[in-house]
Amino acid sequence: MIKKIVWVGLLLGLSMNAQALRLTSTAFQPSQPIPTLYTCEGKDYSPPLSWMDVPAGTQSYVLTMDDPDAPAGLWTHWVLFNLPAKTLGLRENLRKLPQNAQWGANSWGHLAYNGPCPPTGSHHYVFTLYALDRVLALPAGSNQQQVLKALTPAVLTKVTLTGVYSKKNQ
């Protein structure tokens, strides 16, 4: 019976680990406002992030931050890939990546974090962390579509953390 459960879980792409990968920030709670410090109205710092309960076999991570509420459709604010397996978080205002990690291009074409900056209303900002069974063979500056295409066969599991933001000066 256990073999059947594991097989069904593998077919569905489910992680068979006892603990699921978790992603948190000391800057904001899930589904709560992202502080102004981490937005275009503040210092545009990247927020501190940490993760735990990493699946066995993890070789690297990919991290993205997207705004699914953007008027033009999904807008990417941040792309990092090939974060080493030993990395369990990122500090606030990240400027220097861990060794061998790469910046990907966001929707502005920047190799950097660009924080929440909704033109109107309240928007959701989704941080997605992927645990991969390999390091991606991509050049620095690859865009999110290239990174997502390359990571698809390598995903062990993924987790999201969503925050919200509304501009103060609209």
Image (tube, rainbow, N blue to C red):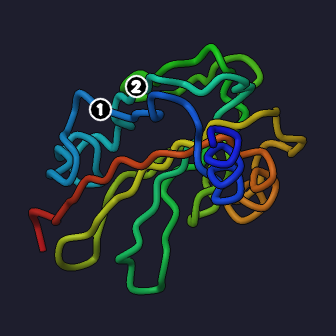
Residue type (three-letter) at the residue carrying disc 1: Ser
Task: Please give the name of the residue rendered at 9% of the width and 62% of the height, measured from the top-left corner.
Answer: 168
Q: Is residue 56 above or below residue 114?
A: above
Give the mark nearer the N terminus: 2 vs 1. 1
Residue 152 is situated, as x and y percent measured from the top left of the image, at: 75, 56
Of residue 132 and residue 146, the one placed in the foreground of this image is 132
Residue behind mark 2 = 50
Contact, mark 2 vs mark 1 (Cβ under 8 Å): yes
Q: Secondary structure at mark 1?
A: loop
Residue type (three-letter) at the residue carrying disc 2: Ser
Of residue 7 and residue 162, the one placed in the foreground of this image is 7
Q: Is residue 133 above or below residue 14?
A: above
Q: Is residue 169 above or below residue 42?
A: below
Kindly indicate the quadrant of the structure image that contains residue 170.
bottom left
Residue 60 is situated, as x and y percent measured from the top left of the image, at: 71, 29
Q: Is residue 100 left or right of residue 40?
A: right
Residue 79 is situated, as x and y percent measured from the top left of the image, at: 59, 48
Of residue 76 and residue 159, the one placed in the foreground of this image is 159
Q: Residue furthest front?
A: 1
- Graded by Cα atoms within 10 Å as few (under 14), some (14 to 19) or many (20 or more), the crowding at tag 1 reads some
Alpha carbon distance from label 2 to label 1: 6 Å
Task: Please give the name of the residue rendered at 26% of the width and 53% of the height, measured from the top-left corner.
Answer: 163
Task: Please give the name of the residue rendered at 61% of the width and 47% of the height, measured from the top-left corner.
Answer: 5
Residue 25 is marked as: 1
Picture quarter with the N terminus: top right
Numbered disc total? 2
